[in-house]
């Protein structure tokens, strides 16, 4: 992920990459990967998009231990021309977009500690690799991510970053998809989270709304807790073709002075899969 106002750490290259340093992981760190992997692999059966499971298979992502990027990249590059590169943490937006536009996915090289098992603020290697990389082995999703990187470079010039960031959030991080036998999760933020992989699909609380590009780019999101709304795409092909065939510049201009929709809003034009009770968010707010 990208962020503003951060300093390039010592030892990172011009492009902010570092060596993964696979030989430096401790056995406790490898064991943490295994623990997270086991828990999610079980959770995902019947919940995740089949393309994600295909990706795990193609890349032979599994146990034991944290994947070595050199080995992972051999398979990933063969599948779609993508590569995973290590960075020390968040990187600036332009750096992030440049990597994506060139089919390089940036991943944190550290793994969470046992205290951070269920929540951490910065994406670690489990979120970045387990969450994001399987779909990069899918040719359509791979094209979408590259296009997003180029879209980001364009958004920087058009002042559309806030709107485009919402697209990333509600697809790449928290997207749902309508699969042959029902809704499935595919966003990395859900897929790598034990709690949210249940909540996003099975809980009565959140809204589930059909994908609508402009509407979504106008919708706030939560960075502090489970989402109050999820957007459902029809297919990865549809997501790719809609975003490729839409010129975002007029959307950015239109949305520049528009107010954002709140995270729980349902609109008259929405294609509603679930009208959420919002009980979870309401309960949390009351307890605070
Ligand atoms: N078509 C978008 C634009 O005009 C670029 C884009 C493509 C953005 C795919 C996201 C995903 O800026
Ligand atoms: Fe992420």
Image: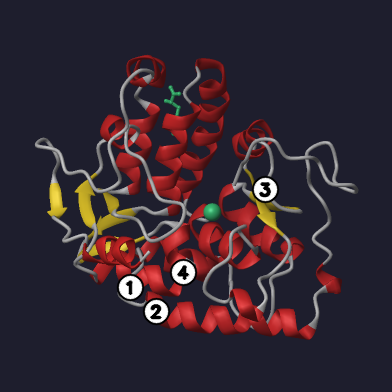
Quarter of the figure with the C terminus: bottom left
CA gap between label 4 and label 1 equals 9 Å
- Secondary structure beneath label 3: loop
The structure residue drawn at horizontal position 36% and vertical position 67%, both measured from the top left corner, is 48
User: Which of the 4 image quadrants contains residue 269?
Assistant: top left
Q: Residues within 10 Å of mark 2 (few under 14, many from 20)?
A: some
Q: Where's residue 86, x and y in %? A: 74, 54
| Contact, mark 3 vs mark 2 (Cβ under 8 Å) | no
For disc 4, the marked residue is 193
Q: Is residue 216 left or right of residue 188?
A: left
Residue 38, above or below 11? below
- Label whose residue precedes the other's in the sequence (2 or 4): 2
For disc 3, the marked residue is 90
- Label whose residue precedes the other's in the sequence (2 or 1): 2
- Secondary structure beneath label 4: loop
The structure residue drawn at horizontal position 42% and vertical position 83%, both measured from the top left corner, is 42
Residue 18, above or below 134? above
Q: Residues within 10 Å of mark 3 (few under 14, many from 20)?
A: many
The structure residue drawn at horizontal position 80% and vertical position 80%, both measured from the top left corner, is 26
- Label whose residue precedes the other's in the sequence (3 or 2): 2
For disc 1, the marked residue is 198
């Amino acid at each position: 992920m990208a962020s503003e106002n951060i300093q390039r750490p010592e030892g990172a290259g011009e492009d902010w990459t570092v060596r993964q340093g696979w030989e430096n992981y401790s056995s406790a760190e490898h064991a943490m990967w295994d623990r997270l992997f086991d828990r999610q692999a079980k959770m995902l059966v019947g919940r995740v998009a089949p393309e994600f499971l295909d990706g795990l298979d193609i890349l032979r992502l599994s146990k034991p231990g944290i994947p070595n990027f050199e080995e992972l990249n051999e398979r990933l590059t063969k599948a779609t021309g993508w590569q995973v590169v290590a960075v020390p943490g968040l990187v600036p937006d332009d750096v992030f977009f440049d990597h994506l536009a060139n089919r390089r996915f940036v991943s944190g090289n550290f793994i969470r500690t046992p205290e951070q098992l269920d929540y951490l603020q910065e994406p670690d290697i489990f979120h970045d690799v387990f969450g994001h990389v399987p779909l990069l082995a899918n040719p359509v999703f791979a094209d979408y991510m590259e296009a997003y990187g180029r879209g980001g470079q364009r958004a920087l010039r058009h002042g559309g970053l806030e709107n485009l960031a919402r697209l990333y959030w509600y697809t790449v991080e928290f997207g749902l998809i309508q699969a042959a036998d029902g809704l499935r999760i595919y966003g990395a933020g859900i897929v790598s989270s034990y709690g949210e992989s249940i909540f996003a699909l099975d809980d009565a609380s959140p809204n589930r709304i059909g994908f609508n590009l402009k509407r979504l780019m106008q919708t706030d999101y939560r960075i502090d807790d489970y989402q109050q709304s999820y957007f459902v795409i029809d297919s990865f092909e549809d997501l790719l073709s809609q975003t490729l065939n839409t010129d975002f510049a007029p959307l950015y201009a239109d949305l520049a002075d528009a107010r954002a929709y709140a995270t729980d809003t349902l609109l008259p034009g929405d294609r509603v899969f679930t009208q959420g009770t919002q009980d979870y968010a309401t309960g949390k707010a009351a307890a605070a």
